[in-house]
Image (cartoon, coloured by chain):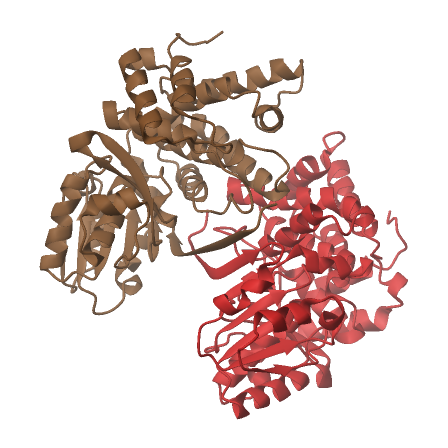
Chain colours: A brown, B red
Amino acid sequence: MKNFIFQNPTRLVFGKGEIARLSELLPDGVNLMITYGGGSVTKNGVYDQVRLALRGRNYIEFWGIEPNPRVETLRKAIQLGKENQIDYLLAVGGGSVLDGTKLIAAGIAADEDAWDIVLRGVAEKQIPFASVMTVPATGSEMNGGAVITREETKEKFSFGGDYPQFSILDPEVTYSLSEHQIACGLADAYTHVLEQYMTTPGQSRIMDRWAEGILLSIKEIAPMIKVNPCDYDLMADYMLAATLALNDFIRMGITQDWATHQIGHELTALHGTTHGHSLAIIMPGLLRVLKDQKKSKLLQYGERIFGITEGSEEDRVDKAIEMTEAFYRSLGLTTRLSEEGIGNETVEVIASRFNNRGVAFGENRNVTGDVAREILKSCFPSFPYK
Amino acid sequence: MKNFIFQNPTRLVFGKGEIARLSELLPDGVNLMITYGGGSVTKNGVYDQVRLALRGRNYIEFWGIEPNPRVETLRKAIQLGKENQIDYLLAVGGGSVLDGTKLIAAGIAADEDAWDIVLRGVAEKQIPFASVMTVPATGSEMNGGAVITREETKEKFSFGGDYPQFSILDPEVTYSLSEHQIACGLADAYTHVLEQYMTTPGQSRIMDRWAEGILLSIKEIAPMIKVNPCDYDLMADYMLAATLALNDFIRMGITQDWATHQIGHELTALHGTTHGHSLAIIMPGLLRVLKDQKKSKLLQYGERIFGITEGSEEDRVDKAIEMTEAFYRSLGLTTRLSEEGIGNETVEVIASRFNNRGVAFGENRNVTGDVAREILKSCFPSFPYK
């Protein structure tokens, strides 16, 4: 096990009706700005619940943080916040609203342009922020990361900083999500776990078991949610899974991968592919290309998640990868670039971007532009891939 | 899933050599008292590491917090702390040193007698404290609980309060633990998980899987540690297991039991039985007596932890309980009161205490004095129990 430092200070407030606690959770006397997305919260009742809970408090609202939040939009929120001496932010919405709010929190606390903060990768200072999370997917509600898009250049990068002061998660607010949103959310959570798990086995028995515990749970609930998307306990399991998939709990003392995310971010930046969907396309491709490097863990994963115990090691590895792709497809997502009309031009743009930036990702830092090209090319043939 | 609020602010600093970080972790300018146990840290090198890390800092030391820390001892530390205007405590030792330090932190911040704080069950205010944890067992390094003994009346009660500011865990410091200490530590961690797991199934898929993940890990490493008690990765797994077994991570949104602990505390208070050992005796007895109530979870546990899939439900439940007791015995612990020379008189004292206090424990609040008597009596016959 590697040495590590773990600290996650976020207060997680979980369960039906908990939005009513908002006012007691917010410190007294803060100058609050509430940030929202495009307006779905006005239809599912969340906006009314928030307004009711904050009756008697003064605050301003900022609307219009889009999916894959754009620095161009967030600059406006930062300006509004500065003009109004805002010192506390509350994000009400999905992971994009909260990610955007993390940059607003940094922008208000800084004198530099927001994109410079993103490019540096770390927010040195942020005003405090909290969230009412409505879309289980990114885990942003209990971590210090955020991913921001610059529309002008079609770039998408992440940065790290403070954790939310608190996050309220009411599984009932998920009842109004579309099947595609749920599919992308489940794919996102599942892939977050794989990014932290599918590296070298034997680094920590408990981290392995905990990652597998989330994978097994997501795999179990996914088909049931399709039939019962308003079952409270199912949606509670889903919502908690998404949070625990990316709140540092399953990465103590171990190496991590994250190359799938880096390639997926490019697909989203260039084509607008929903984040979770981009991962469902790239992760199986990455496993196909790096299956030798990840062989031991793939064997463990195949056995513990899919019960694969028969056949040669090579057969079991291939089967584990096939079943991973089949799982993403079972959610209702495509897993091939060809199905999304994405062609070779995009592959070359991504490979060039990686090569020009001189970056390499993955637990062994060997996913260069050339390896990314190979991964993307393996995502062209129609499914099933042989 | 039940509604819940989760927040664990402790900074966990884990790995070899991390004691050297002590000075950077402690705030500047604090008036520090370091608390110690009986002196084992002077033999295993921890005391020297702490002194080296704190070179140039002023602090006072308090020595002599005993296993099952006594309020009579802690009152002296509280007085010393008050006399010296101490505003920060560092516990260096095992769970007892840290538990005692939690009460010292409360006593220094209060005007009342320390035992009154324990009896209230909650510390309203504490000065900040941190730890260098040397014995993986209680989980005290990352939770807000403490258990205190009053020698005068042979009572042992727990109270809750703040979490450590940080805890340093270096697996190398465990190399000097005795086989009995390790056995009790593993039994303690295993039982902590069972107390949070062995209730009603289906409350949270992930909490079930995470509890099982710790149980499987402990079961896997226990025999290996017997052979290789100085294997870094094994001891790291053990140390992390003990922390994660009782830091709130596996009890989100679920019911809990804790009756075994309540009965075990009485055994310790009356006979000085090591805490982990007392649990190894009581838990199998509790499962025997409450096996109908816990049947569904026992079946799941038997299958997922011990691979028990054959036979009638009753057979599988009995087998799961037998294998649990066999696990405790495999650590080198006895599991019967008769083996410890504890007789019926003690059983009656414990039953009377529970009945006189009017308390009842367990997830269904049905472990009264009478049920405790039944549980204890089932721990008399020699092993294996039929």
Classify residue B4 by image quadrant. bottom left
Answer whether residue A316 is visible to the viewer in this image: yes
- The picture places residue B12, in percent across and down from the top left corner, at 53, 58
Q: Nearer the viewer, residue A144 or B247?
A: A144
Classify residue A238 by image quadrant. top left
Where is A139 relative to B266, above or below? above
- The picture places residue B32, in percent across and down from the top left corner, at 53, 80
Residue furthest toward the bottom? B83
Q: Nearer the viewer, residue A320 or B363?
A: A320
- The picture places residue B361, in percent across and down from the top left corner, at 62, 63
Residue located at (43% from left, 42% from top): A246
Side of B119 relative to B219 (left or right)? left
Residue located at (56% from left, 73% from top): B54
Q: Nearer the viewer, residue A191 or B188?
A: A191
Q: Nearer the viewer, residue A134 or A212?
A: A212
Where is B117 relative to A156, above or below? below
- The picture places residue A127, in percent across and down from the top left corner, at 25, 59
Q: How many marks?
A: 0
Answer whether residue A134 is visible to the viewer in this image: no
Where is A317 relative to A301, above or below? above
Residue located at (54% from left, 74% from top): B121
